C-alpha cells in the first residue's frame, strides 16, 4: 500500500529562486501558458512584432547561395513550392497556439510528442535559433567590417553582446523595438528594387537567365530542384518563432474575430509570403551584384547585395555604403532579438525537463548567444548550405508530425480536441508524434547522405515531410490515442471558477486554472512551472498501480530469467547508454570529417582516405571511453536510485513519526481548546448571571423606591383627605351661620341706627363695613382651596392606585392627566422659559385592563425624560428663541384593530441618534449625568409594557426631529399567560 505523503513546503532557498523566476517582466511566461492579465497588447501590435522577425537577411543569403549553386529555374520553383507547403503547415500551428496561448514547445507536448518527447523538438528548435542567430550576426559583422574595418572575430562578439540587453525584458521591449524600426526597415528594403528596376531594366532578364555555377544553367533540373528545396525547408522552423509571439494575442471574441484571424494568418503562416519575396529578392540582388563585377563568393553576402542595390538609389558611394550598413544592422538586430528570445524559451523548456531546474529565461538567453558566437568563430557562414540541409530534415519531420496531429488526428478524433501541455496530465513519450518524427528523420537523413540513390537524396526533405505526415495518423489509429492523456484534468470541467485565480501551493503565486494542475504529492494545486521543476514526485500522480517498467519487461523477454533481474537491467541500460554515446560521438566525428575534410577541395583523395582512417581509429578509441562512461553512468544511476529509495524509506518513516506527533499535538490542541471553551463558557455564564443579578437588584431597588413612594403618596393623601373633607364639609355650614349673623347685624343696624359711643368706636375699630363685605369672599376662597386640595389628593390616589385592585379596567386618560397634574410644577413657566405646552389628542378609548399604577409609572418616566430633554435643549437658547419655538409634548391615543390601544408621547426636542436609540431600553444606559439618572427608568418601563402588559414599546427618533415613544397594549390581558410567565416581577390580578 502506498504511503501517504504529507504536503511540505519547499526550502527557503528554492522559495526565493522560484519567486525570482516568477518575475514575468523578465520571464515572459516561458515554460507556461500566457495568462489573460499579460496579454494586454492589441492584435495589430502582436502581429507587427511577429512580422518584425522576417527582417533577417539570411533569407537573402540563402536565395543568393541557391541561385549561384542551382540557377534561376531550380531556385525559383523550389522557393515557390516549399513556401506554399510552409504556409499550409503554418495555418493549424498558428491557430492552435493563438487559441491556447502557448509557445511552440508546449504545443508540441500536447500534439503527439509527450512531456519528455518534446524535449528533442526543443533541442531542434533551439538549434534553429542559434544557427540562424549565428548566420544573422555574421552578416552584420561583415557589414561592420566593410564600413569600420572591424575584424570579424570582434564583430561577432559585438553583434552578439548588443542583443542581450534588448532581449533581457522579453516581448515588452521587443514590441517597442519592432514598432519603432519597422517603417525605416521596410522603406530601405523596398527602395533598391524600385530604383534598380527603373535604372537598369535589363537586370530582370539577366536574373531570369542567370545560371550561376549550376550544371543545368538557368534551366530546370529535378535533382537540383530537390537539393534547393531541402535548403529552403530548413526555414520551416521559423514558424516556432512566429508562434512565440502569437501566444500573446487576446482571446478571440465576437467583436474582434476578423482582427484576430487577420493577425493569426499574417503573423503566422503569412511570414513566408514576405520570406519568399526576400528569398527571390536575394537571388535577384546576387545576380545584380555579379553583373556589377562582384565575385561569386562575395555576391551571396547580403551587404554586397544591397551595396549593388543602393548604388542605383544614391550616387555617392560613401552614402551608399553607409545606408547599406545601416539597413543590414537594423535588419539583423530585428531578427536576432527574435532568435535570441525564441532560443531562450527553447533552452528553458529543454533543460527544465532534463534537470528539473530553471534558473530563468535570461540565463538561457546568454547560453544561446554563447553557442551562436562559437559557431560564428568556427565559420558557420562558409558551410551554410550543408548545415541547413542536414538540419532541415529533423525540423521538417517535427513540423510534419505536428501538423498531421493538428490537421488530421484532431478532426478525426484520433487525439484529444484540446491541447494539454502540463506535465501532470501527459505521458513522458507519445509514439504518435515522437515516433513519426524519429522514423521520418532517420529515413530522410539516410536518403540525404545518398543511401537510397540520387533522387532520394535530392528529395529527402519531401520524404521527411511525407513520412511524418503519414505516420502520425497511422500510429494514432493503431494506439487508439491512449498515449495523449495520462490522467484527466479536473479543472477542465470547472466553469466560472470563484475566485478566478488559483494560488500555487509551492511558490504561492496566483495563476489562472489553465496554468494549474492538481498534485497528489502536495495534495493541492500547483502551477505548471512548479510541476515541471518538481524532482521528488517521480510522476506518482500518473501511477495507478505497481507495473513493471519498460526496461524490466524488455529484460524479462530477452534473457527469460536466465540472468538475475538486476543484471539484465544493467546490461540493457549499459547497451542503451553506450549506443547513445557512440551515436553522438560518431555523428560529431562524422560531421567534422564530412564538412571539414570530405567537402573541402584542399585535400587530395589519398589525404582524404588517410584522414578517414585516422578518424576511424580515433572513433574506435573514443568508443572505449564511451563504454567506460556508459558503465559509470549505469552504476552511478543505480547508486542514486538506491540512495533515493533509502532516503524515501527514511522519509516515509520520518513522516510517519511526524504524523503521529501531529496527531498527538492536534489532540492536545483540541483538548486545550475544549478546556478553554469550557472556561470561556463558564466565565460567560457567570458574567451573565452577575449582570442579571445586578440588574435585578437595581430593578428591585428602583421598584421598592417606587413602591415606597407610592405608599408614601397614598398615606399622605389618606391623612390629608380626612381633615380636608372635614373642613370642606363644615365650610358650607359655617357659611350659612355667618350669613345669618351678617343678616342679624344688618337688621340690628336698621332698627338702631344710632349706636352708643362705645359701640360706635368698636365698629370703626374692627372696620365692620369691610368685614361685612369681605367675609363672604373669604368663605368662598376657603371653599375653593379645599376643593383644590381634594383634587390633588384624588390625583395622588389615582396615580398610586393603592386603594384599588392591581389589575383592573381603568380609564387611561385619567392616569395620563393625573401624572401631568403631579408634574404641573415642572410644566409651569419660569424665568428662563415659557410654559411647556401639552397637546392632548385623545381618541375614544374603552376601559383598558391593566396595572394602572405601573402604567402611570411608565407615563411619569416618559414625561420626566421629555422635560429633562427640554431643559438640556434650552441651555443653548434664549427666552425669545424658546418662545418662538416653545417646548411641546403631544399625547395621542387611538383604538387599533385586534383590540389594542396606542399611546404615543412625542416631544419636539433635539431627538436622539441611531446609536443611542438602539440602547435606550438597555439597563443602566443613560445620557444624563451621574447624579441625574440611573439608566433604569426606560428599562423598567419596557418590562412593564412588554412583559406585564403583553404589548410593544418602541422609540422613533432622529437628530433634530424630536422623539416619539409608542406604546401598544391589548385592551384585555391574557391573565392565564401572565400567571404562567417566569418573570419575577409579574403579580397576578
Image (cartoon, rainbow, N blue to C red):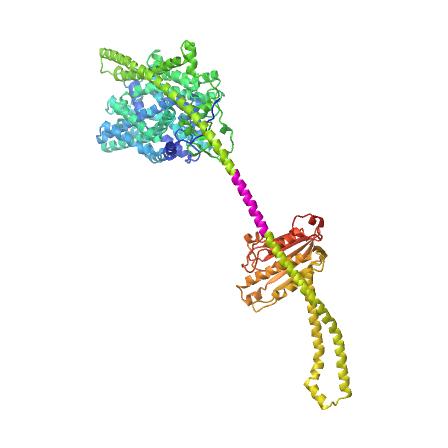
Q: Is residue 185 magenta?
A: no
Q: How many marks?
A: 0
Percent across and percent down for residue 641 are 39, 20
Quadrant housing residue 838: bottom right
Classify 972 as above or below 284. below
Q: Magenta span covers which residues?
A: 674-694
Percent across and percent down for residue 780 are 71, 74
Let me know if residue 675 appears in the view: yes
Percent across and percent down for residue 850 are 69, 55
Considering the whole magenta stretch, tell me its main secondary structure.
helix
Left or right: 263, with 689 as reference point:
left
Left or right: 78, with 898 as reference point:
left
Left or right: 235, with 758 as reference point:
left
Classify 442 as above or below 937. above
Along the line of sight, the residue nearer the viewer: 24 or 625? 625
Percent across and percent down for residue 875 are 53, 64
Quadrant housing residue 730: bottom right
Along the line of sight, the residue nearer the viewer: 738 or 312? 738
Quadrant housing residue 812: bottom right
Let me know if residue 201 appears in the view: no
Amino acid at each position: 500500500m502506498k504511503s501517504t505523503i504529507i504536503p511540505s513546503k519547499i526550502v527557503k532557498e528554492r522559495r526565493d529562486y522560484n519567486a525570482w523566476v516568477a518575475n514575468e517582466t523578465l520571464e515572459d511566461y516561458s515554460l507556461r501558458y500566457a495568462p489573460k492579465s499579460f496579454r494586454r497588447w492589441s492584435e495589430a501590435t502582436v502581429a507587427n512584432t511577429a512580422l518584425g522577425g522576417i527582417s533577417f537577411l539570411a533569407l537573402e543569403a540563402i536565395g543568393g547561395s541557391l541561385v549561384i549553386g542551382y540557377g534561376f529555374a531550380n531556385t525559383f520553383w523550389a522557393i515557390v513550392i516549399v513556401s506554399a507547403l510552409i504556409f499550409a503547415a503554418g495555418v493549424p500551428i498558428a491557430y492552435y497556439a493563438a487559441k491556447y496561448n502557448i509557445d511552440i514547445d508546449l504545443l508540441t507536448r500536447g500534439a503527439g510528442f509527450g512531456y519528455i518527447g518534446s524535449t528533442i523538438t526543443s533541442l531542434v528548435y533551439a538549434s534553429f535559433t542559434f544557427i540562424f542567430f549565428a548566420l544573422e550576426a555574421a552578416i552584420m559583422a561583415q557589414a561592420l567590417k566593410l564600413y569600420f574595418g572591424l575584424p570579424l572575430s570582434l564583430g561577432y562578439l559585438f553583434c552578439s553582446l548588443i542583443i542581450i540587453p534588448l532581449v533581457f525584458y522579453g516581448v515588452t521591449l521587443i514590441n517597442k523595438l519592432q514598432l519603432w524600426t519597422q517603417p525605416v526597415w521596410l522603406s530601405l528594403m523596398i527602395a533598391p528594387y524600385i530604383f534598380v528596376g527603373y535604372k537598369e531594366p535589363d537586370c530582370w532578364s539577366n536574373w531570369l537567365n542567370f545560371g550561376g555555377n549550376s550544371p543545368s544553367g538557368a534551366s530546370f533540373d529535378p535533382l537540383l530542384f530537390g537539393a534547393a528545396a531541402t535548403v529552403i525547408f530548413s526555414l520551416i522552423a521559423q514558424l516556432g518563432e512566429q508562434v512565440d509571439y502569437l501566444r500573446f494575442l487576446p482571446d478571440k471574441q465576437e467583436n474582434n474575430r476578423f482582427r484576430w484571424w487577420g493577425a493569426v494568418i499574417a503573423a503566422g503562416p503569412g511570414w513566408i509570403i514576405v520570406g519568399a519575396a526576400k528569398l527571390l529578392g536575394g537571388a535577384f540582388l546576387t545576380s545584380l551584384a555579379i553583373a556589377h563585377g562582384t565575385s561569386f563568393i562575395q555576391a551571396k553576402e547580403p551587404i554586397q547585395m544591397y551595396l549593388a542595390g543602393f548604388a542605383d538609389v544614391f550616387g555617392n558611394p560613401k552614402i551608399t555604403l553607409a545606408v547599406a550598413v545601416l539597413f543590414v544592422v537594423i535588419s539583423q538586430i530585428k531578427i536576432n532579438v527574435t532568435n535570441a528570445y525564441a532560443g531562450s524559451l527553447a533552452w528553458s523548456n529543454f533543460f527544465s525537463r532534463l534537470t528539473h531546474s530553471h534558473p530563468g529565461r535570461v540565463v538561457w538567453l546568454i547560453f544561446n548567444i554563447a553557442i551562436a558566437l562559437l559557431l560564428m568563430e568556427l565559420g558557420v557562414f562558409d558551410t551554410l548550405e550543408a548545415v541547413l540541409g542536414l538540419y532541415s530534415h529533423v525540423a521538417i519531420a517535427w513540423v510534419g508530425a505536428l501538423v498531421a496531429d493538428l490537421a488530421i488526428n484532431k478532426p478525426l478524433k484520433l487525439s484529444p480536441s484540446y491541447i494539454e501541455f502540463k506535465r501532470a496530465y501527459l505521458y513522458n513519450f507519445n509514439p504518435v508524434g515522437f515516433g513519426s518524427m524519429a522514423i521520418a528523420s532517420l529515413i530522410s537523413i539516410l536518403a540525404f547522405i545518398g543511401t537510397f540513390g540520387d533522387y532520394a537524396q535530392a528529395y529527402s526533405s519531401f520524404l521527411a515531410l511525407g513520412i511524418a505526415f503519414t505516420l502520425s495518423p497511422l500510429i494514432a489509429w493503431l494506439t487508439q490515442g491512449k498515449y495523449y492523456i495520462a490522467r484527466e484534468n479536473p479543472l477542465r470541467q470547472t466553469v466560472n471558477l470563484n475566485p478566478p485565480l488559483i494560488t500555487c501551493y509551492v511558490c504561492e503565486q496566483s495563476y489562472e486554472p489553465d496554468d494549474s494542475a492538481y498534485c497528489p504529492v502536495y495534495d493541492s494545486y500547483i502551477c505548471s512551472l512548479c510541476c515541471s521543476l518538481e524532482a521528488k514526485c517521480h510522476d506518482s500522480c500518473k501511477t495507478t498501480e505497481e507495473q513493471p517498467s519498460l526496461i524490466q519487461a524488455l529484460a524479462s523477454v530477452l534473457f527469460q530469467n536466465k540472468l538475475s533481474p538486476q543484471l539484465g537491467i544493467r546490461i540493457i541500460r549499459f547497451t542503451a547508454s553506450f549506443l547513445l554515446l557512440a551515436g553522438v560521438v560518431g555523428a560529431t566525428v562524422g560531421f567534422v570529417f564530412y564538412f571539414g575534410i570530405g567537402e573541402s577541395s584542399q585535400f587530395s583523395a589519398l589525404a582524404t582516405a588517410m584522414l578517414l582512417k585516422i578518424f576511424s581509429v580515433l572513433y574506435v578509441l573514443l568508443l572505449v571511453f564511451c563504454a567506460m562512461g556508459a558503465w559509470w553512468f549505469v552504476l552511478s544511476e543505480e547508486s542514486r536510485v538506491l540512495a533515493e529509495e533509502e532516503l524515501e524509506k527514511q522519509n516515509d518513516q520520518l513522516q510517519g513519526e511526524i504524523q503521529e506527533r501531529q496527531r498527538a499535538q492536534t489532540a492536545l490542541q483540541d483538548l486545550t481548546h475544549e478546556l478553554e471553551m469550557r472556561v470561556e463558557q463558564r466565565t460567560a455564564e457567570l458574567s451573565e448571571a452577575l449582570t442579571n443579578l445586578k440588574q435585578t437588584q437595581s430593578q428591585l431597588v428602583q421598584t421598592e423606591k417606587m413602591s415606597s413612594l407610592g405608599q408614601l403618596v397614598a398615606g399622605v393623601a389618606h391623612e390629608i383627605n380626612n381633615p380636608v373633607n372635614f373642613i370642606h364639609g363644615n365650610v358650607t355650614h359655617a357659611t350659612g351661620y355667618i350669613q345669618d349673623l351678617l343678616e342679624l347685624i344688618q337688621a340690628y343696624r336698621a332698627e338702631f341706627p344710632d349706636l352708643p359711643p362705645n359701640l360706635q368706636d368698636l365698629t370703626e375699630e374692627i372696620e365692620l363695613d369691610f368685614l361685612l363685605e369681605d367675609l363672604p369672599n373669604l368663605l368662598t376662597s376657603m371653599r375653593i382651596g379645599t376643593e383644590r386640595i381634594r383634587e390633588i389628593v384624588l390625583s395622588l390616589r389615582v396615580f398610586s392606585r393603592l386603594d384599588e385592585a392591581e389589575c383592573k379596567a381603568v380609564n387611561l386618560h385619567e392616569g395620563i392627566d393625573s401624572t401631568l397634574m403631579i408634574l404641573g410644577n415642572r410644566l409651569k413657566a419660569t424665568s428662563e422659559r415659557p410654559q411647556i405646552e401639552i397637546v392632548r389628542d385623545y381618541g375614544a378609548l374603552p376601559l383598558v385592563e391593566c396595572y394602572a399604577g405601573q402604567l402611570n409609572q411608565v407615563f411619569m418616566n416618559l414625561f420626566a425624560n421629555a422635560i429633562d430633554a427640554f431643559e438640556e435643549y434650552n441651555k443653548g437658547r434664549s427666552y425669545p428663541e424658546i418662545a418662538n419655538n416653545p417646548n411641546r409634548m403631544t399625547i395621542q391615543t387611538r383604538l387599533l384593530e385586534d383590540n389594542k390601544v396606542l399611546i404615543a408621547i412625542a416631544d419636539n426636542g433635539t431627538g436622539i441618534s441611531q446609536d443611542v436609540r438602539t440602547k435606550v431600553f438597555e439597563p443602566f444606559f443613560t445620557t444624563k449625568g451621574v447624579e441625574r439618572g440611573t439608566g433604569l427608568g426606560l428599562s423598567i418601563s419596557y418590562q412593564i409594557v412588554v412583559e406585564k402588559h403583553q404589548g410593544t414599546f418602541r422609540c422613533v427618533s432622529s437628530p433634530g426631529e424630536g422623539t416619539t415613544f409608542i406604546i401598544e397594549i391589548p385592551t384585555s390581558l391574557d391573565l392565564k399567560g401572565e400567571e404562567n410567565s417566569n418573570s419575577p416581577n409579574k403579580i397576578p390580578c
